[in-house]
Structures are given as C-alpha cells and as structure tokens.
Image (tube, helix red, strand yellow):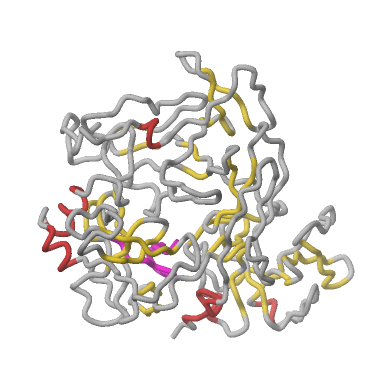
Amino acid sequence: MRQILNVFGALSFSAIFIMPVMGVEHAVAADNKPGIEREDYRRVPMPPGFRVEYSERDGPVFADARGKTLYYWPQNTMRNGITGDPKNQSLCTDVPTTETAGLMSPYPPGLILPELDKRKSCAEVWPPVLASDDAEPVGSFSVVTLKDGRKLWAYDEHVLYTSILDKEPGDVRGAVTRQRGGETPAPREVAVAPPAIPPGFGIITTALGRQLLTDKNFSVYMSDRDGPNKSNCDEVCTRTWHPIIAPASARAQGDWTIVERSPGVRQWAFRKSPLYTSVLDADIRSLEGSDVPGWHNVYTQKAPPPPAEFTMQETITGIVLADSHGKTIYLYNCGDDSMDQLACDHPDAPQVYRLAICGGGKVERCLRDWPYVVASATAKSESRTWTVIEIDPQTGHFAQPGQDGALRVWAYRGAPVYTHAGDGRPGDINGHANGEFGGGRNGFRAFFLRDDFFNNAG
C-alpha cells in the first residue's frame, strides 16, 4: 500500500497570493509565511512593462504590464490537419468562427457551432499582446507585424496572448487541464519563465507541483537520512539510489549547491538536499521511489493542497482525489472543433457539449449522473487554484448574485468538479475516460494525483 499522504507532503503546503507590483521581475508572497518554497527563474531581458509573476500551478510565468499571464499557441498536428500559429504569425482573428473545421474525426467540417449569437472571436477570448509602433526586440522577445499593420509581441517566435479567464496576476486559467496530444484539441501553452536549474535537469508541471526531473525525464529524489549538504547514502545505498553527479565545471548558485562525496566526486544538491535517481524506476516521471520510507520526489514548487474536506483514495491504477465521502473527483474537459480550438470546459462557455456527454442533453440526467461537488457551508478558498463558485444547476453557467437554487460548488482553476453516480465505493473510477476519445476532447477524467500505469496524473 502506498503512503497516500506522501503525495502532498502531508498536505502542509500553504497558499500563495501575488501582489500586483508593476515593473519588477518577481512577485511577493502576500502572507509572508515561512516555509513557502517557490521556483527560482533565470533573469532574462523583457520588454518594457513586462514582468514575471508567480503562479500556483506553473511557477514563474511571463506577464504583461497588468500582470496577466502570457500564452502562445504552437502548431499542433491533428487527425485531419494542422492548426495553431506558425512561427511569427497569428491565426487568431477577430472574426468569430461559425463552423467546425473537421480536424478531429469522425465529425466532418461545416457543422454549425452552437450559440453563434453569443460566440466570441478567437481574439476576444485570447487577446493578442500588442506592441507599440516603435517597439524593438528584447532578448527572446520579438515583434511580429500583421498584414493590417498591427504589431504583436512574440516569445521564441511565437505570438503572445492573454486569456479572458485570468482575473488576477498569476492566474493560469487559460491553460488546459486535459492531457495534451493524441486526440485532444490544440492547447494554448503558458509562457513559463526559464527555470534556474543547471544543465542536466528539467521540470514538468503536475497536479502535485513543479516536479524536478533529469534531462532524460527520470525522477529526482532526496533522502531524509541526508544532512544539509551531506550525503549519508553509502556504497550499499548507491546500488539502488544513484547520486546525480555534478561536472567539474559546475558551480553553486541560488538553491543549488554541490556536495563532495569523495575527493573529486561532486554531487548536486537542491535546497541543501543531495539528489539521486532510482535504479528501480522503470518509467519516466515516476513517483514509485517515494514509496520507500524516507525517500521523496523533489519539487521546485509544490501545488496548493486541495480543500480540507477532500480525501485521497487508492484505485486500481493509482491515487485519485475524492470528496469527503471518498467518491472520486472528476474534471470535465472540452475543446470545440473550430479552427480557433476554443475551450468549452468552463461556466462561461456553451454547455451543450457537457450536457450531451453527461446526460444526452437532459439537465436532470446530468445532475443525477454527474453531480457537482457541493462545498460545505463553512468551506472557503485557501488558494486561487481551488475556489468556491456559485453555479446555476439548470444552465451550468455562473449563478446571478442571490439567485434562488444556486449551488456553492468546488472549482479547480475556475471550472467546477464532479463526482459520478456509477462509483459505489471509495476508489471506484467507473466514470474515468467517459466521453469522446477517452474524455480528452469532450468528457470526464478522474483527478489523478498519481497513476503508475497510464500516465494520467498531472
């Protein structure tokens, strides 16, 4: 049996709030509580007014002068074509699309999209980041001139956008929660500031936080037996736990130090903890090493913990987030098949997609089979990742202030979460992958914190 509390480090990570300070390269934790560890980043040249904000999900992200997170839309190969921005171009127009593009079989092109009278254009949902007429390239930031003469900022040759879903500095609600690739819609990516990590390492964003990996995507571990900048992993220990060796040219910097294991043998340490890989890891991004007592995966920044009334449950494939009764939590994923590839998985979007999947278009069936996770009367948000919102259950849209029959429900990054009526016992995941293409394009997926078989976590 896994040590489930290991997943969130005993749920001890506190929330981060961002002070909107203009013209600075980093933000400050508003609560100033000790023990909050956030990912460091490399200071790079930025356009005037741009800055870096700390997000709870993606660590340090580039932001505009208002603190709004920057995104880009890389080209994506779909089943029936390619969409997304070519380098130094923008295909995100101010004309609303009206028909499907036929990029995702089996649906043909030319089908009329829902709620055309309310449909926003791509540029309304994803406002491009305008540059002044006299703007000059700065570092990896360049200026792209459109055919109509407007100038846009780009990063690494990708045009930049903000999201109308983001309300406060550090929000990343425009980033998808569904899996990328395969049969899923072409996602917008967060413009993450380059992390301050040595060569040989990488970082991925998961539901648990910003996980540190080797450049081969294998997990990095630390041991409770080690002291500050001291390894106690002896010869027998190193048969299973390989020290991550620092080259002779490596130098300590910031959170990174070097431990001398023996004369001339130098080992990397992060926040004074010596680093290792596990010989027993058969797959990349593994969490299995943390099952060994005293060993832990390493995160440059932990994700905020889920609501206190939630639980974690063991399933046949891993660990899922669950409500107070042990019922698995599900995320709803949706992206339409237009050329814009606009998301339809939040309360402001058309609800016809969700209603079709959860109840064949019938509201009553959806409420019965996929009920919202109702927040307790005393529940309150401890972060901006997990919030309490009010939903009109009959429409699926946000409720009006004081509306009769409104539900106070839990939301993950602004979108409601659900349970499934078909789950009878804690650990059941009978609703997982319910929908089109395994729930990745339009449907429900279990909120996996850890999945040792199908890489659903994160």
User: Residue, x 28% and y 49% (percent of image)?
Assistant: 441
Q: Is residue 284 magenta?
A: no
Q: Quadrant of residue 102?
A: top left
Name the foreground residue: 44 vs 181.
44
Residue 24, position as x, y percentages in the image: 70, 44
Q: Residue at x 28, y 45 (%)?
A: 349
Q: Is residue 119 above or below residue 311?
A: above
Q: Position of residue 360 (x, y in %)?
A: 11, 55
Residue 4, compared with residue 416, is above or below; it is below
Q: Closer to the camera, 394 or 230?
A: 394
Q: Quadrant of residue 290?
A: bottom right
Q: Residue furthest front?
A: 402
Residue 87: where, in percent of width, then height?
50, 27
- Side (left or right) of 327 relative to 249: left
Quarter of the rendering occupied by the N terminus: bottom left
Judged from this view, the residue extending furthest toward the top is 148
Taking 335 as reference, is 157 left or right?
right
Q: Position of residue 211 (x, y in %)?
A: 57, 62
Magenta stretch: give its range: 444-458
> In the rendered view, does 280 fall on the left or right side of 244?
left
Q: Could you tell me how many numbered marks the image carries?
A: 0
Quarter the C terminus occupies? bottom left
Q: Which residue is rendered at x = 57% and y = 43% of the image?
A: 67
Horizontal side of residue 293 vs 314, given as left or right: right
432 or 162, nearer to the observer: 162
Q: Is 199 drawn above or below residue 138 in the view shown? A: below
The residue positioned farthest toward the right in the image shown: 263
